[in-house]
Image (cartoon, helix red, strand yellow):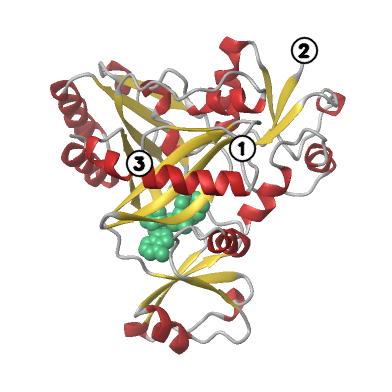
Amino acid sequence: SNKVWVLGNGQLGAMLAHAGQPLALDVRPIDIMVPTAEQLAMQSNDIVTAEREQWPESALSLQLSEHPKFINGPVFGRLADRFTQKSLLDELNVATAPWELVDDNSDAAELYRKYGERVLLKRRTGGYDGRGQFWLKQAEQTQLPDDWRNEAIAEQAINFDEEVSLVGARTHDGRCVFYPLTLNLHQDGILMASISPLPRLQALQAEAEAMLTTIMDGLDYVGVMAMECFRVGEHLLVNELAPRVHNSGHWTQAGCHIDQFQLHLRALCDLAVMTPQVNFQCVMVNLIGIDKDDRWLSLPNAELYWYNKEVRPGRKVGHLNLSVKDNETLASSIAQLQQWMPAQYQAPLAWILLHYQ
Ligand code: ATP
Ligand code: MG
Ligand code: MG
């Protein structure tokens, strides 16, 4: 039968393969740098997708990216470069943080004058989990580092109320479906925790769906896309887009009748796609640079996804989904995690208790 090849074999690829199983979809995440004979046996009616926006060039990545059924092929490069991604948002009139390209003529004083006393430089490519960012601070007279010229954009610092994201999918015939908005907490640029759905975010759902619809239509996109936003008062500004399944959609594994991984596969394979039914409110805790602790499995509402990667500081090594059947159970699970988890988790766990209702 036809296969779905996934460029990249990290945790997102693994979870796509896992989600394909009940539908008997043969999903094959592949390590781009290590071709095997089996991978080279790709058929022309197979489907190719990716779990990342960028990949090193290799014989295999070329074979994959030139495949006639590499869905969204041109989109990856366009969104992988923040310059072309932000240009797209401007072209589509989708609100985003004010920005410009940093080039040979850029000047810190001019950036402070235009955007205010804090300006965020972001590498055009390769940044993730807050890596590839550099704050310019007028108070500290920070100058533009030379090696960021032509390699970065400058963005206004947004004094947002909170961060939310929308995960949606578009079908081959241009229909869009969405999950409810997710509330996200980032610490040092990395996602720590998510909560969805939240009744109070319902008021922003229509605006968010209209924005992501414009983007997916504009790209003639097929499959799951994630849109990270800042909420400023009653409105949203797009922070960035991911043309793939996304960490802030992991809660759907415990909360919805179709999770984001299966939704992506359904859209790619032209199977039925409908608005996922939400069965539970869920809380997701990212496991970052922390050793596996089997006590987590004893929580009555926890589902553990452990990526089996080497644990290193700052590295995402798993996540815990906690479904909220009743407030008492959630509160006691979080209280238990507060005992078991190290210092850097205390703020995100307290944040969950404060916000999930
Ligand atoms: P990801 O892992 O989500 O791909 P990333 O490294 O691509 O992260 P961004 O999502 O652009 O980076 O930024 C990471 C975090 O930094 C944001 O979630 C937000 O908390 C903060 N941030 C980004 N841009 C701004 C901004 N213009 N003003 C204030 N904070 C910002
Ligand atoms: Mg990013
Ligand atoms: Mg981000």
The answer for how far apart the CA atoms under marks 3 and 2 are is 39 Å
Q: Residues within 10 Å of mark 1 (few under 14, many from 20)?
A: many
- Sequence order check: which comes first, mark 1 or mark 2? 2
The answer for how far apart the CA atoms under marks 1 and 2 are is 22 Å
Image quarter where the C terminus lies is top left
> Of the residues tagged 1 and 2, which is closer to the observer?
2
- Whole-percent x, y for residue 127 in the image: 55, 57
- Sequence order check: which comes first, mark 3 or mark 2? 2
Circle 2: element type: loop
Q: Residues within 10 Å of mark 2 (few under 14, many from 20)?
A: few
Q: Is residue 255 visible?
A: yes
Q: Residues within 10 Å of mark 3 (few under 14, many from 20)?
A: some
- Whole-percent x, y for residue 189 in the image: 40, 55
Q: Is residue 208 above or below residue 263?
A: below
* Residue matched to label 3: 205
- Sequence order check: which comes first, mark 1 or mark 3? 1
Residue plotted at (41% across, 27% down): 252
* Residue matched to label 2: 1
Q: In the shown orientation, is residue 53 left or right of residue 35?
A: left
- Type of the residue with mark 1: Glu
Indicate the quadrant where residue 337 lies. Answer: top left
Indicate the quadrant where residue 236 lies. Answer: bottom left
- Whole-percent x, y for residue 288 in the image: 40, 41
Image quarter where the N terminus lies is top right
* Residue matched to label 1: 51
> Of the residues tagged 1 and 3, which is closer to the observer?
3
